[in-house]
Amino acid sequence: MSKIIIEGGRKIQGELRVGGAKNSVLPIMAATVLNGKINIVHDIPKLSDVEVMSKILRAVGCDVKRENGTMIIDSSKLDNHRIPEELVREMRSSIVFLGAMLARCGETIVSYPGGCEIGPRPIDLHLKSLREMGADIEEKHGFLICTTKGLKGCDIQLDFPSVGATENIMLAAVYAEGTTTIRNAAREPEIRDLQQFINAMGGNISGAGSNTIRIDGVKELREVEHTIIPDRIVAGTYLTAAAMTRGEIVLKNVIPEHLQSTIYKLKESGCKILYTHDTIKLVAPNKLHAIESIKTLPYPGFPTDMQSQIMALMTISDGISIITENIFENRYKHAYELIRMGANIKIDGRVAIIKGVPKLTGATVTANDLRGGAALILAGLVAEGTTIIENAKHIERGYDHIEDNLKFAGAAIKKM
Ligand SMILES: CC(=O)N[C@H]1[C@@H](OP(=O)(O)OP(=O)(O)OC[C@H]2O[C@@H](n3ccc(=O)[nH]c3=O)[C@H](O)[C@@H]2O)O[C@H](CO)[C@@H](O)[C@@H]1O
Ligand SMILES: C=C(OP(=O)(O)O)C(=O)O
């Protein structure tokens, strides 16, 4: 079981480059099955989720090669429509293969993904939408057995702008007969990246980034080369690390527009933030102020994937901060670990009330999920003494060499 050990009290400063976004790379890897040709994808981060996605692609017959940050996926020999159950269990977001495999093969068998560390994560919107497009989906013994005699474009109204459901519909609709319209679609930047990838291989999608997406079915797709957009959550995490340690950091390869809600809240805590079109500089104040209220919302609202990290910052900010978690029901497990480090946090359902304390103290804590683990690293960077984070494997799902990057920026941190 991997552990991260941190000696707190060092500033995070200097320059860091942000790599490709996990939440872009995963659906884009699923989309590589569509063309039955060569896909070249740049700026692929080294993450355990990317490893699982590669294993799934190989299991269905694709050839996957990786050279540093570039991945070459040849989907021409795809010959299996069953996604191995153990891999779906390892990574819930493998559910995006549903739409992609239905489009390519007209059939697929995927095990039901179930919930995860952050609570129940139903897929009813995915299934309802794919059925509306003409998919026949049987739910039997924990598996989804999906077939179609041909998907047809239709109008889909999502009850909630689900990221995964929007992606699954986009993938399924690429070859569908006629036009598919998704209303109340998710507007996350990663959705637009998926549109760009599919269009670069000859698909016909418009509207991603707005709440209405139109997909006109095409007959054939070609080879493609694409670069993944930078990870806005990794960028937000490094900015928060500099803010909490009274540091000063410049991030390169970022899209500041994607981080506006995070930047806005970091400014409220007293940080000075300057940016160009692809860099962000943060200068921390001597004293962090409480952030009156943060409500997680679909993009462009404040991202639930930054909630844990910003909570870590609030624990040492002067005054009372309030978080309302609106996206996931059970995303406060990290709060109880932060309390072990001296934080003053009260949880009442979806609301967390955080009263800033003068200092945190190092302790042995457990990462229960990806972003909760990142929050514990941030707390460890400022805590007095040694922090040991157990179960650090969760962090590897979404951060490429976080300990090396933070060490480079001044932290006393190591992984064991
Ligand atoms: C790989 C990836 O991109 N993961 C991101 C994606 O997850 P994911 O795609 O799973 O998130 P969704 O946007 O689908 O889920 C948001 C909310 O909708 C609910 N819901 C979703 C689908 C459904 O069929 N029924 C339903 O009720 C979920 O339970 C949750 O409460 O968006 C989340 C919300 O920004 C992020 O936290 C995740 O990092
Ligand atoms: C919840 C997250 O991801 P996933 O949907 O892959 O579990 C996340 O990135 O914080």
Image (spheres, rainbow, N blue to C red):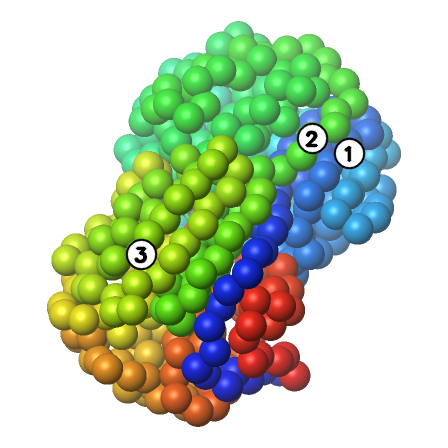
Element class at badge 1: strand
Q: Nearer the viewer, residue 164 or 149?
A: 164
Q: Residue at x 27, y 74 (%)?
A: 316
What's the residue type where badge 2 is placed?
A: His
What's the residue type where badge 1 is placed?
A: Ile
- The part of the image, by quadrant, that contains residue 181 is top left
- The part of the image, by quadrant, that contains residue 183 is top left
For residue 40, the mark is 1
Q: Residue at x 42, y 26 (%)?
A: 209
Q: Do the residues labelled 2 and 1 touch (CB within 8 Å)?
A: yes
Spatial CA span between label 1 and label 3: 39 Å
Q: Which residue in the protein does label 3 denote?
A: 271
Left or right: 294, with 412 as reference point: left
Image quadrant containing the N terminus: bottom right
Q: Residues within 10 Å of mark 1 (few under 14, many from 20)?
A: some
Q: Which residue in the protein does label 2 denote?
A: 226
Against 330, is 154 above or below? above
How far across and down, in percent of the image, does residue 23 sit? 53, 45
**Mark 2 / mark 1, whichever is N-terminal:** 1
Spatial CA span between label 2 and label 1: 6 Å
The verdict on label 1 being within 8 Å of ligand 1 is no
Left or right: 67, with 69 as reference point: right
What's the residue type where badge 3 is placed?
A: Cys
